[in-house]
Image (cartoon, coloured by chain):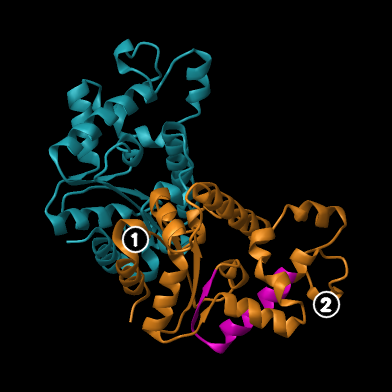
Chain colours: A orange, B cyan
Amino acid sequence: MDKIITIGRQYGSGGREIGQRIAEKYNIPFYDNELITRAAKESGFAEESFERAEDRATNSLLYSLAMGINVYGNQDFGFSGLSLDDRIFLAQSDVIRKVAEEGPCVIVGRCADYVLKERDDLVNIFVRASMSYRLQRAINNYHIDRKKAADFILKNDKRRGNYYNYHAGEKWMNLNNYDLVIRSDLIGIEKSVECICMFLGE
Amino acid sequence: MDKIITIGRQYGSGGREIGQRIAEKYNIPFYDNELITRAAKESGFAEESFERAEDRATNSLLYSLAMGINVYGNQDFGFSGLSLDDRIFLAQSDVIRKVAEEGPCVIVGRCADYVLKERDDLVNIFVRASMSYRLQRAINNYHIDRKKAADFILKNDKRRGNYYNYHAGEKWMNLNNYDLVIRSDLIGIEKSVECICMFLGE
């Protein structure tokens, strides 16, 4: 395996677990919360600020534009004019680029597909699933209150979508962003891993 | 194989060929131009009217709405108020529903995923590919003029997108419409077939 594999996923689809198993199969590093921790440590930001970064993305691009800030431009101009969310995103992006430089790995979420889009060893996977499957996983695996689970899932997807749209400037649900999109509930986690590994080769 | 498999595809991605091979593997019928011919014969429309239906979808929904016509409603009110495109779509939809009733099959294009969406034995696949791969296929396999190929591909995708958006009322590129999306150029036609068959099972 000589690829950098990014995984986007709808909440409760099992995308994170699938990513972990793929990393295990190929014996390559897996980055998710580890990535946040590393980003936090290296950039000197407080770790807590990072933990919910993906859940806090707002429409601050308008604000940034109004302030005349080029969010995606040269980072050497300093962080002074950027929102905390933007600064966290830039620090995370640095970490994503660094771990990708270190060699093949699996990175879940955080617009890694966008951050690494110039690399030609990148494969972008997206995992989706039916609402009923995700409800079941949210309740059983993540112990979300049964009555609140549907709302919780929709809000999480909304946040992830906003985060992606804001940072990557693309629709999260546009299939052109991904090399393989798979519905995990139709065949289950184990078969999804097999199917993705067949696509990845080796 | 006990599924109805629909395949959407970007122009030049090899989606049609992949659909054919899947049908051969499972020894089930494959519908593409055959479907058009059958629709034409059964409905009594001239065959030529059907042949370029997918390529001629326009924004006639606005017109239909302005005329107070419920395009997706009860078909028993007769075809009199509908545009030719809408009448063709309804006749094709009837055929799609009929062949699906007959048993497992592969249906390429023509919003079959939307027409059959109430069925629980449906699996919707989408095939996409890089522009360079599609250019190569357009030139080599379909003998499109090299200078006009890029424009030709974009126009074809635009037409297919318009057709889908108009009839299905959904964005063609929204990954939520599909159970599996695969980039054929990364692994080739043969491997794409294998990967899809692994997803389909049996």
Quadrant showing the C terminus of chain A: bottom left
Q: What element does badge 1 sit on?
A: helix
Residue A106 is one of the magenta-drawn residues: yes
What secondary structure predominates along the stretch shown in magenta? Answer: helix
The image quarter in which residue A192 lies? bottom left
Q: Residue at x 21, y 53 (%)?
A: B20
B163 over A132 or under it: above or below: above
Q: Dot 2: few (<14), some (14–19), or many (≥20) neighbours within 10 Å?
A: few
Quarter of the image where one finds residue A181: bottom left
Q: Secondary structure at mark 2?
A: helix
Chain part drawn in magenta: A88-108
Tell me the residue that label 2 is attached to.
A76
Give the residue number, with chain letter if any, for mark 1: B140
Image mark for residue A119: none
Extreme residue toward the left, this view: B27
Q: Nearer the viewer, residue B52 or B122?
A: B122
Q: Amino acid at mark 2?
A: Asp
Please tell me whether mark 2 or mark 1 is closer to you in this view. Answer: 2
Q: Are dots 2 and 1 on a single chain?
A: no
**Mark 1 belongs to which amino acid?**
Asn
The vertical placement of A83 against B107, above or below, is below
Residue A201 picture location, percent across and down: 34, 77
Residue A1 x/y as whole percent: 40, 84
Q: Is residue A171 visible?
A: no
Residue A187 horizontal/vertical position (percent): 29, 60
Q: Is residue A120 visible?
A: yes
The total number of labels drawn is 2
Residue B201, magenta (yes or no): no
Q: Is residue B182 left or right of residue A156?
A: left
